[in-house]
Image: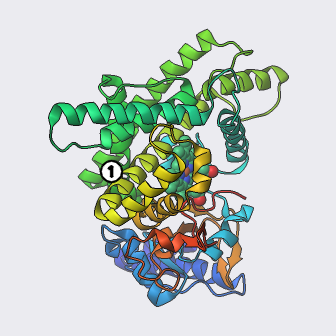
Amino acid sequence: MIFDLIVDNVCPLVVVRISLITLIVCLVSKLYWSHIGSRLPLPPGPYGMPLLGYLPFVGYDFHLRLTELGKKYGSIYQIYLGTKRVVVINDARLIKEAFRQPVFSGRPDTELTRILQGYGIVNTDGALWKEQRGFLHSVLRKLGAKSMILGRDCLELKIRSQVKIFLNDLKSTIYNQQSSIYIRPYLACAASNVIGSLLMSMTFKSSDRKFRRIIELMEEGFRLFAIAMPVNFFPLFRFVPLVNYAYRKMQSNRDETSGYFHEIVEEHRQTLDPEHIRDFVDAYLVQHDRIKESGQDSFFSEKQLIQVMNDIFSAGLENVTSTIEWAVLFLMLNPKVQQHIQTEIDQVIGPSKEAQLADLEQMPYTEATFWEVLRRSNIVALGNTHSTLEDSSLAGYSIPATTHILPNLYAINMDPELWENPEEFNPERFLRNGRVYRPEYFIPFSVGKF
Ligand code: HEM
């Protein structure tokens, strides 16, 4: 009634102004009260632009910008990306303190995660995540056990056989080409064969067309994510042609990989023998049927299984392949480190025996080199973003519900207070008195559990 009176008697421009002022007052008071409500201050942080927040300033190397901001605002600070509040944590102790609390275990609900329709493990939370992650862990633990279980070879044997194939392929290619080669496809093939055999009893040849396509789609997924990421914070970015293209391509790629995994699940279904579990897909189908028969409530479903397969392939393949690629590069650049590892190999394994995981216990320098590769390569510079499930607090700051929590692992790995000359590649920093020493602030796999 009052609104009608104003609209009828006041000029339209004044109405627009009053509406805008009201909107701004509402937004500011919402922010103010969410902060005052907890009686704790919000984390400090830089101001950004209206609506876009700090988004225009993040640049391509987001992790470097966030690390620079950490020098000014401390180990925990907030920025706005679009209208979304993001709390960045640059300190391992605080990351552990946060992620060990259930309230910090949420996953952001964004335009891009919605492509996955709430399925999988990497981008889900709550009861679904807990049940599905628990099941994945228990099956992988059994499949990776040291004994022959489930009627199949153990994980270590699978890895050893892939190492042999990888080295043979490499040798014959080098012999035939007599020139330098690009090792990434060979590494990707070996890594996917380990994951593929655990997951669905499948191994591939690097020349296999279907397999190449899946690897291509997985690798493209990471590039597309980087381009489409702004829509998570400002949905209008969807109308920017390049972002829109990346967003649509992510959707169609996901449909293509899901179609591929669907065929594999169907094949497994037809040959399934509950007494002889071959792999993760078999174990999942048996559990699915068991739960269905019992009438219990659960999140087991074929769509969920297919997204878990997508998650494991993309999470595992990229990380393992890139880590080994970096390892090769660091060893090429550091011949002394190579020599040191060779000495350990000669002493512990010798020229004729095949390397075994158990040998690593007597090869501290080799293990230290592995940790140093993970530290210095920073292949996961920013851990998975979490989200707060309700209002909370951390380090004396108020953290409102649905805040995105971003663990900046790069800042920890490259902190000169923690590592002497952090830019330098030096495995010795992971050794103490000839034994491997992993400081508690070294968390290359983040802390993804509670
Ligand atoms: C060098 C190797 C690897 C690195 C550095 C790495 C790193 C990470 C990091 C930082 C996270 C985020 C944890 C969090 O939510 O806070 C993660 C999650 C995950 N990784 Fe890896 N990872 C590696 C290898 C693998 C492999 C081989 C697989 C599977 C075969 C895998 C499967 C997963 C899955 C399923 C998640 C999601 C876990 C969850 O949300 O609960 N990762 N990884």
Q: How many marks?
A: 1
- Name the image quarter holding the N terminus: bottom right
Q: Nearer the viewer, residue 232 or 396?
A: 396
Left or right of residue 170, residue 154 in this image: right
In the picture as drawn, the residue positioned furthest to the top comes out as 270
Mark 1 Cβ and ligand 1 under 8 Å apart: no
Q: Residue furthest bottom?
A: 72
Residue 100: name its quadrant: bottom right
Q: Is residue 350 visible?
A: yes
Q: Along the line of sight, which residue is nearer the eye, 396 or 143?
A: 143
From this viewpoint, is residue 4 visible?
A: no
Residue placed under numbered mark 1 in the picture: 223
Q: For the residue labelled by badge 1, is the local secondary structure a helix, a strand or a loop?
A: helix
Relative image position of residue 236 (x, y in whole percent): 36, 58
In the picture, measured across the screen, residue 100 lies left or right of residue 229, that is right
User: Which residue is found at the position 83% from the left and 25% from the top?
Assistant: 295
Measured from the top left, where is residue 228 in percent x and y? Answer: 35, 53
Q: Is residue 168 left or right of residue 279?
A: left
The correct choice, above or below, for 278 with respect to 104 in the image is: above
For residue 3, side relative to residue 148 (left or right): left
Please name the amino acid that badge 1 sits on: Arg
Q: Nearer the viewer, residue 169 or 12?
A: 169
Residue 331: where, in percent of width, then height? 35, 59
In the image, 223 versus 320, the foreground residue is 320
Q: Residue at x 39, y 64 (%)?
A: 337
